[in-house]
Amino acid sequence: MNNYSILLVEDDENLLSEYQRILNQKGYHVNTANNGREGLNLWKKNIYDLVLADLRMPELDGMELIKKIKKNQPLTQVIILSGEGREGDMFDAVNQHVFNYLKKPINLPDLLDSISRAISNRDMVLIALEQMVKKSPNQPEILENGQTFTPKRLYDEVRKNTPYGQKFYKSLKTVLTDVEPLNQTIDDILKMD
């Protein structure tokens, strides 16, 4: 899974096109929105590894967008891009489990470093599922109640935070935290009952 998906929500069209161009060159798949409402609509239709969002935007404030994303898909990493910070914004960002809060003007190397760290610091269950997808994306896995899912489908169910994804996430997280990862590979852990 080399091509991570990013939702970039920014009302400054020059910044939006510049960031999109740079991130595409770095190999990321980027969808863009000019305001929070457009961003929310794109987010509802897609699954993103990372959301980059301005705070002050027309139609839907960036913090409201972030709250909706984190409520429905808490594993999604978020980085705030802000030019007009208000008192309490940083506190709100921490409460929403935002990965980073970057103040404009943003230094490009800092932005790229923050993106790289956000993706590499994702939840251990997502990382384990990502490894399964790399190894065999379409090999059916028979799970409880005789249901069959491919690793790719499990990955998407967990990322979408569906009821089944939540259940699978909890069970895999328990397995991953109850074993000594130094002595076992992810594949060995996932084969355990």
Image (spheres, grey):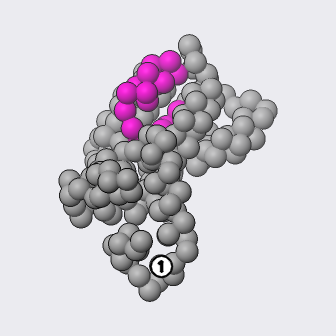
The N terminus - image quarter? bottom left
For the record, the magenta segment spans 35-53
Q: Does the magenta stretch include residue 50?
A: yes
Residue sitting nearer the eye, 9 or 21: 9
Residue under the image location 33 percent in, 63 percent down: 131
Residue under the image location 53 percent in, 57 percent down: 170
Horizontal and vertical percent position of residue 135: 24, 64
Horizontal and vertical percent position of residue 33: 42, 23
Horizontal and vertical percent position of residue 115: 46, 50
Residue most toward the bottom? 183
In the rendered image, is residue 4 in sight?
A: no
> How many numbered circles does the render carry?
1
Residue under the image location 69 percent in, 32 percent down: 85
The C terminus - image quarter? bottom left
Residue most toward the right? 87
Residue under the image location 58 percent in, 38 percent down: 70
- Specify the quadrant of the image occupied by residue 6: top left
Q: Is residue 21 above or below residue 125?
A: above
Q: In this view, does 109 lie to the left or right of 145?
A: right
Amino acid type shown at disc 1: Pro
Horizontal and vertical percent position of residue 166: 50, 48
